[in-house]
Amino acid sequence: MLFIEYPKCSTCQKAKKWLEAHNLTFEDRHIVENRPTKDELKGWVEKSGYPVKKFFNTSGIKYRELELSKKLPDMPLEEQLDLLASDGMLVKRPLLITDGKIYVGFKEKEWEAMTHA
C-alpha cells in the first residue's frame, strides 16, 4: 500500500494515524519531495474510475492562483496530467494506493470498508 501525503496537512496526519491505528503496513511518500509522475497519475485515474478533476486539490492556493476552476473544463486530459505532475501541491491528498482501489482524500467510512474487504 502506498500512502502519499503532505506531512503538514492535518487531513494527511489524521489519515496516517488511522492507518497506524489499524495496523496497516504502508509505504510513506512525501507528495512535494517525491511528486507523482504523469504515468503514475494517469494509471491511478484510469484504475480509480474517477474523473481527473477529483485528483486536483481544489481548495489549494496554487489551484486558485492558476484559476484552474475556469481552465480545467476545456483543458485536454494530457495537459491536466502534465499540470498535476508538475507540482505536488496541486494534487489532492492524501492518496492511498492499494492493489484493489485508489483512495483520493481521507474519508474514514470509505477507508473503513477497506479493512473489512
Image (tube, grey):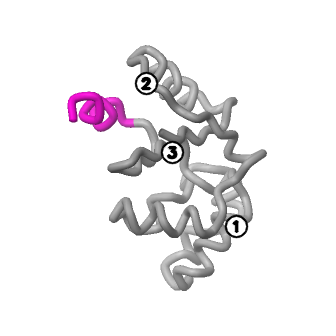
**Looking at the image, is mark 3 or mark 1 earlier in the sequence?**
1
Which of pointers 3 and 2 indicates the residue nearer the eye? Answer: 2
Depth check, front residue: 106 or 113: 113
Which mark, residue 18? none
Separation of marks 3 and 1 at Cα, in angstroms: 22 Å
**Residues rendered magenta in the picture:** 107-117
Q: Secondary structure at mark 3?
A: strand
The C terminus appears in which quarter of the rendering?
Answer: top left
Q: Which residue is mark 1?
A: 66
Could you classify mark 1 by the number of other residues whose Cα lies within 10 Å: few (under 14), some (14-19), or many (20 or more)? few
Mark 3 is surrounded, within 10 Å at the Cα level, by few (under 14), some (14 to 19) or many (20 or more) other residues, namely: many
| Circle 2: element type | loop
The numbered mark, 3 or 2, whose residue comes first in the sequence reads 2
- Amino acid type of the residue tagged 3 in the rendering: Leu
User: Camera-side residue: 90 or 97?
Assistant: 97
Which residue matches tag 3? 95
Residue at screen point 43% across, 36% down: 106
